[in-house]
Image (tube, grey):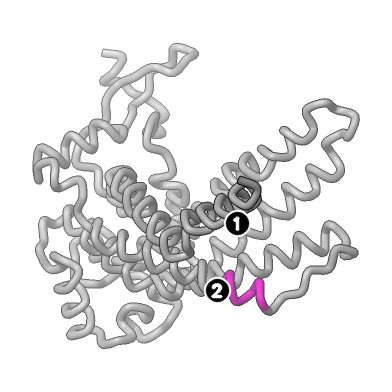
Amino acid sequence: MMESSENLPGQVVDVERDTAPTPVDVDTTVLLLGAGVTAITHPLLYVKLLIQVGHEPLPPTVGTTMFGRRVLYLPGFFSYAQHIVKVDGKRGLFRGLSPRIVSSAISTVVRSKVKQQMELLSKTDELQSSLRKVVKETSHEMIIQCLCRVATHPFHVMSVRCMAQFVGREVKYSGMFRCVVRIFKEEGVTGFYVGFCGLLCCSGLIPHVLGEVLFLWCCNLLAHFINTYSVDESFSQASAVRGYTKFVMGIAVSVLTYPFMLVADLMAVNNCGLTAGLPPHSPIFKSWMHCWNHLSQKGHLFRGSSFFSRRVPVTSLPSIEN
């Protein structure tokens, strides 16, 4: 009886070790979860992409602001999604989903592997200042994010072009394998990263990376300074406030960095043979900076940033008054 009681803890430990999830199990779970989230949110990104390229198939409707002023509103997400379903059916809402799922899986694997290598190479220094620690962690996040973006950018290009075909009703990019063959045949291997004029700045990769790097640094540094100098230690909910600071800063900074994402998506479809990226629907941009300047002059740098309350700026509406 004594031996059995002494062996019981060891047996429990062995059982716990046997049932502990392995890295492979964890990676598989994360991959499946990522694929599910990508599939669920894809209709949102699909509608957003069509708005970004300036496709407005539905007329604006008359509405009123909270102050009673009459304005014109462009269709929101639900109206836009219903239009897509009417044209292409429910499956049409998932056009371009396959490259995004592959992109999510590759990003997860690359992020996991690079993070493991960085943890092995980096040495933790508990004496380093809080700011120095934030800078070090952000630098590591930046490297990981840049590598993930470079690895997944070809699939982003394929997904954007598949979705943008809705504008001109083309079938040039249908299916991930055909997308790869088409881009490789017409533009070569570098077609996934290099634009039509042979410049890296024409592919949309650079603004995407710049936007993500700027987001990381602004979000992390702002959250650090707010938690350090604005949150009082005597406040009873100080720890809870610090936990939400980075989340709130992420929302605020994402608004500021949105133009980079918009330009990246437009450059991915620019001059690729689709109606969405050719005149008269869209000018041909020589570089992402040319695209940025064009959108800035038109006041469209935040086009597609909102799914609801998309107001049409007008000074007078005589037809409405009548």
Asked whether residue 195 is in view, the answer is yes
- Residue shown at the point (9%, 42%) measured from the top left: 89
Residue 173 place in picture, x, y as percent? 16, 67
Asked whether residue 54 is in view, the answer is no
Q: Residue 309, labelled with which disc?
A: none
- At label 2, the amino acid type is Val
Quarter containing the N terminus = top right
Q: Is residue 34 left or right of residue 50?
A: right
Residue 4 place in picture, x, y as percent? 59, 49
- First-in-chain label (2 vs 1): 2
Report the front residue among 275 and 245: 245
Give the structural element (helix, strand or loop) at label 1.
helix
Which residues lie in the magenta part?
115-120
- Residue shown at the point (74%, 54%) measured from the top left: 221
Q: Main secondary structure of the magenta part?
A: helix
- The residue tagged 1 is 215
- At label 1, the amino acid type is Phe
Residue 153 place in picture, x, y as percent? 39, 71
Indicate whether 90 appears above or below 112: above
- Residue shown at the point (44%, 18%) measured from the top left: 65
- The residue tagged 2 is 114
Indicate the quadrant where residue 243 lies.
top right
Residue 277 colored in magenta in the image: no
Q: Residues within 10 Å of mark 2 (few under 14, many from 20)?
A: some
Real-space CA distance between mark 2 and mark 1, rounded to the nearest whole angstrom: 20 Å
Indicate the quadrant where residue 100 lies.
bottom left
Quarter containing the C terminus = top left
